[in-house]
Structures are given as C-alpha cells and as structure tokens.
Image (cartoon, rainbow, N blue to C red):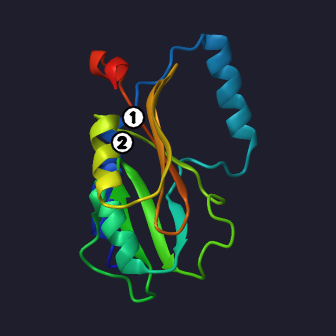
C-alpha cells in the first residue's frame, strides 16, 4: 500500500457519502443493465482522479488550497502530489508548462458562494476567464489556474446575484 493510501481511503469514504441516491429504474431496465454488465469482462467503476501537469508545484498548491483543496501530508517518493477537492482526487506532477492554456482537463466545482470566491481569487491576482453570471444551472464563473487550466465554479443563484 502506498504511503498515501490511508488519506485516499478517507477521501474515498467521504466522497461516497456525498453521492446522490440511485435513480429509480424499472425492473426490466434494471435487469437489462445488470445483464449487459454480466457480459463484460471488465468495466470502469469510478473516476479515481484527475491528473494535472504543473510547472510550479508550490504555486499550484497555493492556488488549489485557496479554493479549498486538502493536500496529503505525506508526499509520494515519485514526486507526485495528491489532494482532495470537493470529493474529487487531483493528482499533480511537474511537467512542462501547458502549451495550450485552457486546454486539458476542464474542472467544474460546486461552490457555496460564487461571488465571494470570485472576489477572493480576483484579489489574489488570478486570471478570471468569465465573471460570475446567472446561468440556467446556477451562478457560474471561470478562472485559470497557474498553468492555464480552466476551472468553472457554480454556485446557487440568490437574490443578491441579481443585483451584482
């Protein structure tokens, strides 16, 4: 077991507790789904994490901690750094700078208050790609992380959101 195993198990247990309940399915559909799974020799069961190549580990750590990430206290021997953010496992590895800023993984996170986090990230000097706007799915804004990965934050639409 890797040194990070205990932290990963804790994060996985926390993530499982946040999963929505299974949708109701008819017994015919449920049987069809189960029979199709029985025919496969292997299936994906869950997303283990999202890998991000970063050019400066400390700069990335500061950014992701600012938005709520919890980094493992023990670093792996291979230089890879792990954290958990909103029940999602992120994996960081030193790599050349993103040659296509905004390309690569596109992360979307729910946030309790889009306007407050937007203001905090703007004060810290991060590039705001799209300011907070009310969308049909919530109040969303986008920011670039230090390596140019686009991250969307979606919060609830509140009365105050209409006055901003």
Residue 2 can be seen in this image:
no
Query: Furthest-left residue in view?
Result: 73
Picture coordinates of residue 156 (x, y %)? Answer: 35, 25
Q: Alpha carbon of mark 1 to alpha carbon of mark 2: how far?
A: 5 Å
Name the residue: 33% across, 53% down: 121
Labels 1 & 2 near each other (Cβ < 8 A): yes
Tag 1, which secondary structure? loop
Question: Compared to 7, does 1 lie above or below?
Answer: below
Name the residue: 35% across, 47% down: 86
Q: Nearer the viewer, residue 42 or 151?
A: 151
The C terminus, quarter of image: top left
Picture coordinates of residue 114 (x, y %)? Answer: 34, 36
Q: Mark 1 points at which residue?
A: 19
Q: Nearer the viewer, residue 120 or 81?
A: 120
Question: Compared to 152, does 55 lie above or below?
Answer: below
Q: Mark 2 points at which residue?
A: 16
């Amino acid at each position: 077991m890797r040194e990070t195993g205990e932290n990963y198990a804790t994060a996985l247990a926390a993530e499982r507790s946040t999963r929505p309940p299974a949708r109701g399915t008819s017994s015919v559909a449920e049987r069809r789904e189960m029979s199709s799974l029985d025919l496969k020799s292997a299936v994906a069961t869950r997303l283990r994490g999202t890998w991000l190549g970063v050019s400066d580990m400390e700069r990335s750590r500061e950014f992701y901690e600012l938005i709520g990430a919890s980094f493992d206290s023990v670093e792996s021997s291979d230089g890879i750094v792990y954290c958990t953010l909103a029940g999602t496992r992120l994996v960081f590895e030193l790599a050349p700078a993103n040659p296509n800023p905004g390309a690569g993984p596109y992360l979307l996170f729910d946030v309790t208050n889009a306007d407050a986090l937007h203001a905090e990230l703007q004060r810290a000097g991060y590039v705001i790609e799209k300011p907070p706007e009310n969308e049909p799915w919530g109040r969303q804004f986008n920011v670039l992380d230090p390596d140019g990965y686009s991250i969307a934050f979606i919060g609830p639409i509140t009365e105050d959101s209409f006055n901003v």
